[in-house]
Amino acid sequence: MNATPLRQQYLDIKRRHRDALLLFRIGDFYEAFDDDARLLARELDIVLTSKPMGRNIRVPLAGIPHHSLERHLATLITRGHRVAICEQLTTAPVKGESAGRGLIERDVVRVVTPGTVLEPGLLQSKVNNYLAAFVTDGRRAGVAFADVTTGDFAATELEAGAAHLELQRISPSELLVPPNMEVDEGRLPGFITRRTGASFDPAKARSVLLRHFGARTLAPFGLSRWPLAAAASAAIISYLRDTQGVLAEQLNRLRSYHTETYMLLDEHAVRSLEIFESAGGAPSLLSALDETRTALGGRLMRRWLRQPLLDVAEITRRQEHVAWFVAHEKDRAELLASLEVVHDVERLSSRARAGITTAHEILALGQSLETIPRLRAVLQHDAKRFGALLTSLPACEGAVRIIRAAINEEPPTRTDGGMIRDGYSEELDSLRGILRDGKKFLAEMEQRERARTGIKSLRVGYNKVFGYFIEVTRPNLRLVPDDYTRKQTLATSERFITLALKEYESLVLNAQDRIAELELGRT
C-alpha cells in the first residue's frame, strides 16, 4: 500500500460519511481532501492546495483554523451542505503504535445539518430551530418536530390534507421524509433529507421510542393510537443517533398535541396579517408586541402568535395572568428586573448536557438559576393563581451551589485547563501540584546529577519535540554514567535520558491528560 497511515485513516472515516463534507482535524486545523477539498475551497473562497500522502500520492487539500469553525459552518449549512466534524479523540498514538510515530485516534463526533445546529452563532436567539419528520399513508399523516437546542419534542397525527399547513406553522430548518414519498418541495419548508424506509416503519417505531425513553407503553406520550405520529417521532430519534452521537439524549420528553386546539393559519394568512413581517418596513405584529426580556420568552411569544388558541378557558387564564401584573406594578417591576440577568437557560442547559458548553456558559447558566428565588417570590404573592408555574419552577439550589463552587469566576477562554477552582477536587489539585513543581524537580535533579557525575555544565531541560533530557557537552562525554541512555546528538553535545527522568516525563504527561479529562468531565 502506497498511502500513508493518515491517508488510510481518512479514507476509512470518509467511507462511512460519503454524503457529508468531512472536516478532518489535524492539529489546529480542520482539513478536507479530494473532492471535499475542492468543494470547501469553492464555497469558502479559500486556497486549494495539495498534500503528499504516500509514495507518488498527492491529493487536493483545503483547510480552516479550528477556532473559526463556527463562522465557516454558518456558510456551509446555509448553502445546504451536511458537514461531518472529525475530531482528535486522543493526544497520544492509538494502542500498539510507537510514541511520536503512530496515529492518534480520530472519529466523527457529529454531522451538522440545518436542523441539528448547536452553535450559538448559527442560531437566532428568539427563533426555534426545528428538525421535523413527515410521513403519510395518503389518508392520515404523522408530523413530529424537535429543537435539539432546547429539548422541545412534540408529535401529532392529522388528516393528510392538513399536514402541509402544520409543517408551514412549524417552519422546520430540516425536514425528514421517507425515501420514495412524493413531495412538492415548493410547498414543504426546510432542507429536505430523505431517510430509509426502515426509519419510518410504524412496526419498529414503537420499540425505538420505548427504548429511548425507557418506557413500557406509548400511552403516557399519547401515541398509542397514532402509529404515524410515532413513526415520525422515531425517525427523528434514529436520525439524531446516526448523525449526532449522544445528541439524541437531549430529547428526554415527548408531548403529543391536537391541532384542533388552535387556529391553523396558512402562509398567505400569516403574510396578510403581517404577523412576523410587514411590507414597506412598517412594524409587524411580533415586533410591536415583543417586549420579552429573555430568548425563552421571545421564542414562546413567536410560537403563540403562530398558533392562536381556540380554547376559551386557556385564553381567559392568560388574560387573567396579564391583568394581575398590570394591577401589581411593583411585582411587575421586580419580575422584569429579575429577568434582565437571565440568559438562554434552555440552550445553555442543552449544551451542558451535550458536553460542549464552555466555562463562561456554565457561569451564565448559574447566574440565571440564581434568579429563580426572586421569580418565585413574586409568584408567591398569589400562589393560588400561579400554582402551576410555581410547581414547574424548581429552585435549583444544588446546581447553583455546584457551579459556584466548581467554576472559576474568570475562567480562561481556552478549554485546556484552569476552568475548575483550586480546592474543589483533591485529585485535580494534586495533579496541578505535579505540574507546578516541575521546574523545582528539574533544578534539583540537575544539581544531583552534576554532583554525581562531576559534570558542572550538565543541564536538565525540555522541549516539545524530544521531551525531557540531560544535556552533556562533548568534552564531558567520558564522564557520562552507564545508566544514561543516548536520546539525541547535537553539534556540540549529546542528550540523554535516565529511568528516573523517563518516569517523571510519563508522570507529567499523564497528569496533563488527566487534568483535561477531569476539567472536561471525561472521567
Image (cartoon, rainbow, N blue to C red):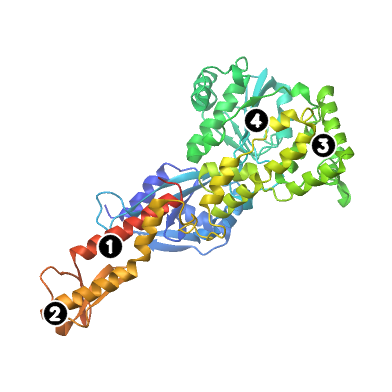
Where's residue 139, x and y in %? 67, 17
The residue at which mark 2 appears reads as 477
Instruction: Classify 10 Å Cα crowding around label 2: few (below 14), some (14-19), many (20 and above).
Output: few
Where's residue 439, x and y in %? 33, 70
The residue at which mark 3 appears reads as 270
Mark 3 lies on a secondary structure that is: helix
Find out whether the residues at labels 3 and 4 contact each other: C-beta distance under 8 Å. Answer: no
- In the image, which is nearer the foreground, mark 3 or mark 1? 1
Q: Earlier in the sequence, mark 1 or mark 2?
A: 2
Query: What separation in Å lies between label 1 and label 2 (alpha carbons)?
Result: 23 Å
The residue at which mark 4 appears reads as 183
Mark 4 lies on a secondary structure that is: loop
Mark 2 lies on a secondary structure that is: helix
Query: In screen coordinates, is 151 left or right of 356?
Result: right
Q: Earlier in the sequence, mark 3 or mark 2?
A: 3
Q: Is residue 196 above or below residue 58?
A: above
Find out whether the residues at labels 2 and 4 contact each other: C-beta distance under 8 Å. Answer: no
Q: Which of the pair 65/372 is nearer the observer?
A: 372
Q: Earlier in the sequence, mark 2 or mark 4?
A: 4
Q: Which of the pair 450/195 is nearer the observer?
A: 450
Instruction: Classify 10 Å Cα crowding around label 1: few (below 14), some (14-19), many (20 and above).
Output: some
- In the image, which is nearer the foreground, mark 2 or mark 4? 2
What amino acid does circle 3 point to?
A: Val
| Residue at (56% x, 50% y) in the render | 404
Query: What separation in Å lies between label 3 and label 4 (alpha carbons)?
Result: 23 Å
> Looking at the rendering, which quadrant does residue 55 occupy?
bottom left
Instruction: Classify 10 Å Cα crowding around label 4: few (below 14), some (14-19), many (20 and above).
Output: few
Q: Earlier in the sequence, mark 4 or mark 1?
A: 4
Q: Can you tell which mark lies on residue 505?
A: 1
